[in-house]
Image: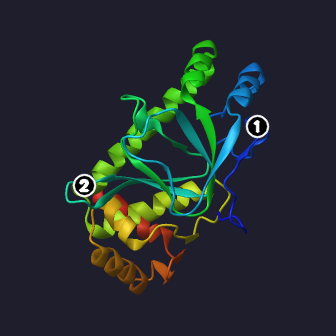
């Protein structure tokens, strides 16, 4: 997931047709003229160093960003000044959808490691999607997926206990990583426990205590940010129990 060396702040020529993430990203299912046109639209990549923002809340909305490498978090500022994490995005996922309705971004997108994104100018993308309906159809599917994900988070925060929330989070994370060719049982967490707690609506102490309990119960092996899932069925049972 992490590049061997820091990525310099520069732009790079990119082609969706040659990308090994095309089956996870916007070009999935596109072929022929549609993919060629998208190649001409997605003209550059942008590097974002760890800790830097791709965009901030209230920035003008100009483009969508497909994560090429690395890991991001999105967050909003609460009234008390704290950051509330609203999501984690990895390679093959889109950032910037929050800005479509108001032409300004409603959250911050911050890199959790040195990352790279493909820049998709939105005004040109709109024009292209009107001509190529398959592109428009897939974009609508992506937006629908985000709505479903938001509903899932609402379920986490509204009805699950701490153990169930963390189990669901870990299962979702490993499933997404597995779809990208990574291990389904071993993961290096790019986010801190405090960020996990913010996302799940849990205090830092609760997250740490729950990780320890999972380890004591033989569900996980935990070494700082390195997690090995020893009993995936046990985690699934926790989540399934919550939906009964």
Q: Residue at x 39, y 78 (%)?
A: 211
Where is residue 215? Give x, y as percent: 43, 83
Q: Nearer the viewer, mark 2 or mark 1?
A: 2
Location of the C terminus by quadrant is: bottom left
Horizontal side of 228 relative to 30 (left or right) equals: left
Instruction: Name the secondary structure under disc 1.
Output: loop
Q: Quadrant of the N terminus?
A: bottom right
* Labels 2 & 1 near each other (Cβ < 8 A): no
Q: Is residue 229 visible?
A: no
Q: Between marks 2 and 1, how big is the CA–CA gap?
A: 39 Å
The 10 Å Cα crowd at callout 2, few under 14, some 14 to 19, many 20 or more, is: few
Q: Position of residue 22 (x, y in %)?
A: 69, 40
Give above or below for 54 relative to 162.
above
User: Where's residue 86, x and y in %?
Assistant: 36, 52
Q: Is residue 139 above or below residue 238?
A: above
Count of labels in the image: 2
Q: In percent of the image, x 37 and y 28: which residue is there?
A: 101
- Find residue 192 and report its image quarter: bottom left
Assign a secondary structure to mark 2.
loop
Q: Position of residue 100 (x, y in %)?
A: 42, 30
Along the polypeptide, which appears first: circle 2 or circle 1? 1
Where is mark 1, residue-wise? Answer: 15
Q: Residues within 10 Å of mark 1 (few under 14, many from 20)?
A: some
Residues 54 and 75: in front is 54
Residue 40 lies, with reference to residue 70, above or below; the image says above
Q: In this view, which residue lies farthest toward the left?
A: 80
Q: Is residue 41 visible?
A: yes
Which residue lies most toward the bottom here?
216
Please give the label number shown on residue 78.
2
In the image shown, does 172 or 49 lie closer to the viewer? Answer: 49
Q: Is residue 201 above or below residue 142?
A: below
């Amino acid at each position: 997931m992490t590049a061997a060396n820091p990525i310099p702040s520069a732009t790079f020529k990119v082609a969706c047709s040659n990308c090994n993430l095309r089956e996870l990203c916007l070009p999935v299912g596109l072929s022929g003229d549609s993919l060629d046109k998208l190649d001409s639209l997605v003209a550059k990549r942008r590097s974002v160093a760890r800790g830097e923002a791709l965009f901030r809340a209230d920035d003008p909305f100009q483009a969508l960003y497909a994560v090429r490498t690395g890991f991001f978090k999105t967050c909003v500022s609460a009234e008390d000044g704290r950051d509330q994490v609203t999501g984690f995005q990895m390679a093959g996922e889109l950032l910037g959808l929050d800005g479509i309705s108001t032409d300004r971004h409603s959250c911050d997108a911050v890199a959790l490691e040195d990352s790279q994104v493909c820049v998709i100018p939105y005004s040109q993308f709109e024009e292209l999607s009107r001509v190529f309906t398959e592109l428009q159809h897939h974009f609508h599917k992506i937006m629908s997926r985000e709505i479903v994900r938001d509903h899932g988070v609402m379920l986490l925060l509204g009805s699950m206990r701490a153990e169930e929330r963390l189990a669901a989070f870990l299962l979702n994370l490993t499933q997404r990583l597995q779809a990208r060719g990574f291990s389904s049982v071993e993961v290096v967490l790019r986010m801190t426990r405090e960020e996990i707690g913010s996302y799940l609506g849990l205090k830092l102490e609760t997250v740490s205590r729950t990780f320890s309990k999972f380890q004591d119960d033989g569900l996980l092996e935990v070494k700082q940010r390195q997690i090995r899932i020893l009993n995936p069925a046990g985690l699934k049972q926790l989540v399934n129990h919550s939906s009964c």
